Image (cartoon, grey):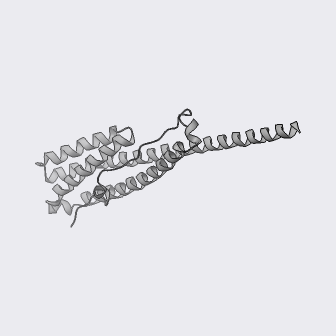
């Protein structure tokens, strides 16, 4: 009879061990997926940052007196490049969207600029990049939502912090209208 009790205890401990092991591996995999999603956002933000000087130079060729719009884009670009986490990136993204919209508002006043092939190509590249940023943002936020849910649920909450896996911040923008469609000039 004692061997049956010992066998049951061994089986229960084994099941609990397997559950904790599988749960921990799931958290680690999810944490890595969130890291990967953040890197995707960083790549797209870098791509946009690489496009902006060309757009600014093109607009500046036609509207060199609009210094405030150009300075705003330069400041916002520097902030987005320097952002190291989702909270800082969210704030920088809000300023970037405002700066880009201001730059394109300036461009609307110059019909020659609007018909420039170089400007149209850069604008198209920027719109495609903005769409990729939005897709990457949705993927990242989905992963963060799942990770945060698992990290805070029992029994994962008992060991996730000790394992170095904690909640993550969402990559949000304060104005959904600011990102509802990529910036573009209306012809």
Q: Could you say where residue 152 lies in the image, as x and y percent from the top left?
A: 51, 43
Write the residue at 26% across / 46% down.
Answer: 95
In percent of width and height, residue 114 lies at 20, 62
Residue 72 occupies quadrant: top left
- Please state which of residues 182 and 30 is positioned toward the viewer in this rendering: 30
> Residue 179: which quarter of the image?
bottom left
Q: Residue at x 65, y 44 (%)?
A: 22
- The answer to whether residue 80 is above or below residue 100 is above
Please give the name of the residue rendered at 60% of the width and 45% of the height, measured from the top-left corner: 26
Q: Residue furthest right?
A: 1
Extreme-top residue of the structure? 162
Asked if residue 101 is positioned above or below residue 3 in the image, the reply reads below
Image quadrant in which the N terminus is located: top right
Question: Does 143 sit left or right of 87 as displayed?
Answer: right
Q: What is the quadrant of the C terminus in the image?
A: bottom left
**Residue 33 appears left or right of 132:** right
């Amino acid at each position: 009879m004692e061997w049956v009790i010992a066998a049951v205890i061994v089986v229960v401990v084994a099941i609990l061990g397997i559950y904790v092991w599988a749960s921990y591996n799931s958290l680690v995999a999810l944490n890595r997926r969130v890291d990967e999603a953040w890197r995707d956002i960083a790549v797209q933000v870098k791509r946009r940052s690489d496009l902006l000087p060309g757009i600014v130079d093109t607009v500046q060729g036609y509207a060199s007196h609009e210094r405030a719009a150009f300075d705003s884009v330069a400041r916002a670009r520097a902030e987005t490049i320097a952002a190291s986490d989702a909270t800082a990136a969210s704030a920088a993204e809000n300023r970037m969207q405002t700066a880009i919209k201001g730059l394109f508002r300036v461009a609307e006043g110059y019909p020659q600029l609007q018909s420039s092939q170089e400007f149209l190509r850069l604008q198209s590249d920027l719109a495609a990049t903005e769409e990729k940023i939005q897709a990457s943002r949705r993927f990242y936020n989905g992963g963060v939502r799942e990770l945060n849910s698992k990290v805070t649920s029992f029994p994962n909450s008992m060991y996730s912090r000790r394992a170095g896996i904690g909640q993550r911040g969402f990559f949000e923008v304060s104005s959904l209208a600011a990102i509802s469609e990529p910036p573009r000039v209306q012809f």
